[in-house]
Image (cartoon, rainbow, N blue to C red):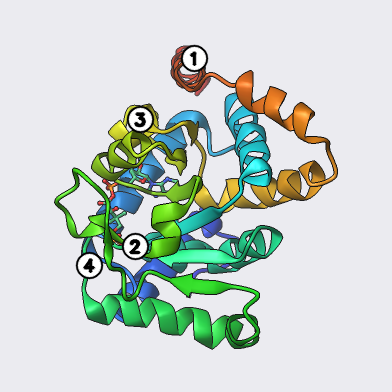
Amino acid sequence: MIPKSHPRYESLMKREKLVDALNRGILAKAGLIAHGRGETFDYLIGEKTTETALNAIKAAAALLVLAENPIISVNGNTVALAIDEIVELAKELNGKIEINLFYRTREREIAIKNEFYRKYKDDVESGKIKILGLNAKKQIPNLDSLRGKVSEDFYNADVVLVPLEDGDRTEALVKMGKKVIAIDLNPLSRTAKAATITIVDELTRCLPLLIKYVREYKKVNRDELRKIVENFDNKKNLKETLNYIIERLKNIEF
Ligand code: PTJ
């Protein structure tokens, strides 16, 4: 039991959630390692949403609202940490959520699907959210990993949100002509570099902001939204994030 007064309470609770998800067959073992890498980068950015991350969140929200057929791709870590926020965001869009696993097994796919049913049975049964990807038959071209198998809906999506993605698939999705929004605390990752928009922020911290801006932008005219997307330069934003980290570390006080 972690006392609420512990200075690292939030962070330790996230770890608890991941361990619990591992025990329930949702998380891949490597998901724990991936989380540790994320924690390191979160220390470097100061465990808060930076200005550059906020710019990326706004551009991502605009792109999602403009999309004809957006889809949210989820893996073990995303479901373990942020199932509620993912469902909330999906309901603001077209409800489509695709299970897509790097360490793909039938058991994990089913465990993740069951988690959506356990927590959001009514929404799944009423069609407010659609859980896709279980009988994925389409293949992303030029991608050998099991992550290349996707549903028809995913194959036809114009915008995909991919929290904690691997670089190979992001590159392949961009080559297919899709707009890819990545959430990744590592600004140096191949995913971060290949995505159309990279949000360098912690998943559970940025999703509420993304939802907030999606709600707001649904009331904004499409030309305005296009401008927000066009004015966003991912490479420039990543460089600014790195410069922010450098300056922060140079000036840190102990
Ligand atoms: O559930 P599966 O089988 O699809 O496997 C998922 C993992 C995450 C294990 C798999 O995709 C993987 O190995 O990913 P990587 O290549 O380790 O990349 C994960 C990235 O996510 C790293 O760059 C981390 O910095 C970042 N990351 C980890 N936790 C968070 C995060 N970014 C944002 N928020 C986090 N909480």
Mark 1 Cα-neighbour bin, 10 Å: few <14, some 14–19, many ≥20: few
State the SS at label 3. Answer: helix
Which mark is on residue 100? 2
Q: Quadrant of residue 67?
A: top right
Residue under pointer 1: 236
- Specify whether tag 4 is near ligand 1 (CB below 8 Å): yes
Name the N-terminal-most of marks 3 and 2. 2
In the rendered structure, find residue 55 and report the number of the disc placed on it: none
Question: In the rendering, which numbered label is found on residue 104?
Answer: 4
Locate residue 11 relative to residue 125 in the image: left or right.
left
Q: Nearer the viewer, mark 1 or mark 2?
A: 2
Residue 194 disc label: 3
First in sequence, mark 3 or 1: give its number. Answer: 3
Q: Is mark 2 within 8 Å of ligand 1?
A: yes
CA–CA distance between discs 4 and 2?
Answer: 8 Å
- Please tell me whether mark 2 sits on a helix, a strand or a loop: loop
